[in-house]
Amino acid sequence: MAIQKLVQSTHPVLTKKAQPVTQFDDVLKDLLLDIEDTLYAEEASALSAPQIGISKQVAMIDMELEGLLQLVNPIIKSESEEKITDLEGSVNLPDVYAEVERSKMITVEGNDLEGNKIELTAYDDVARMILHIVDQLNGILFTERAKKVLTEEEVEAYFENE
């Protein structure tokens, strides 16, 4: 479809709960294609509809070798007690990185493109990305969950140690 423009970090769509998808049609399929095109253009790992200015509970995660995960109306059903703290960022907040604690394992429920209920269990980085995206869809920025927002020097040191 088309690469969409990202909204600015101050756009109100990023801090409000996105609307659930109720129509499973070509408009939804086109939105997912736009999200996919924009995800690749921005070299992002995940992208949600609010990040391109659309208040819909729709997102996509690039799981690399496992392919693309489409999330429609995702709800976290369970989270492991085991947590991991790692660095997170967002294409809507360039050059902002923070240490965020997230569950190591989650179960998420949502819909497929036809509106059928789906459920999946995710671990480690994929679980982190899903939790990050579900927060976005609920109007919660990763900086609100941050244990610590890193300075520019700390970010440089972090990437040097990778």
Image (cartoon, rainbow, N blue to C red):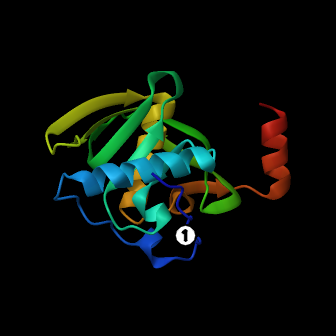
Q: Where does the image place residue 141, in percent across and percent down from the top left?
A: 50, 62
In the rendered structure, the answer to whether residue 151 lies left or right of residue 66 reads right
| Total marks placed | 1
Among the 4 quarters of the image, the one containing residue 91: bottom right
Q: Residue furthest left?
A: 116
Residue found at x 78% / y 49%: 155
Residue found at x 57% / y 56%: 146
Secondary element under disc 1, as helix, strand or loop, is: loop
In the rendered structure, the answer to whether residue 97 lies left or right of residue 103 reads right
Out of 68 and 15, give the one closest to the viewer. Answer: 68
Q: Where does the image place residue 101, in percent across and percent down from the top left?
A: 52, 45
The residue labelled by disc 1 is 7
Q: Residues within 10 Å of mark 1 (few under 14, many from 20)?
A: some
User: Which quadrant does the C terminus fall into?
Assistant: top right
Out of 33 and 83, give the one closest to the viewer. Answer: 33
Name above or below for residue 104 compared with residue 151.
Answer: above
Name above or below for residue 3 compared with residue 36.
Answer: below
Among the 4 quarters of the image, the one containing residue 127: top left
Q: Where does the image place residue 161, in percent across and percent down from the top left?
A: 81, 32
In the rendered structure, the answer to whether residue 77 lies left or right of residue 7 reads left
Out of 33 and 97, give the one closest to the viewer. Answer: 33
Task: Say whether residue 132 is visible.
Answer: no
Q: Residue furthest front?
A: 1
Residue found at x 61% / y 48%: 41
Task: Say whether residue 133 is visible.
Answer: yes
Q: Where does the image place residue 37, in percent across and percent down from the top left?
A: 51, 48
Among the 4 quarters of the image, the one containing residue 15: bottom left
Residue found at x 52% / y 63%: 144
Query: Of the residues shown, which amino acid type is indicated by label 1?
Result: Val
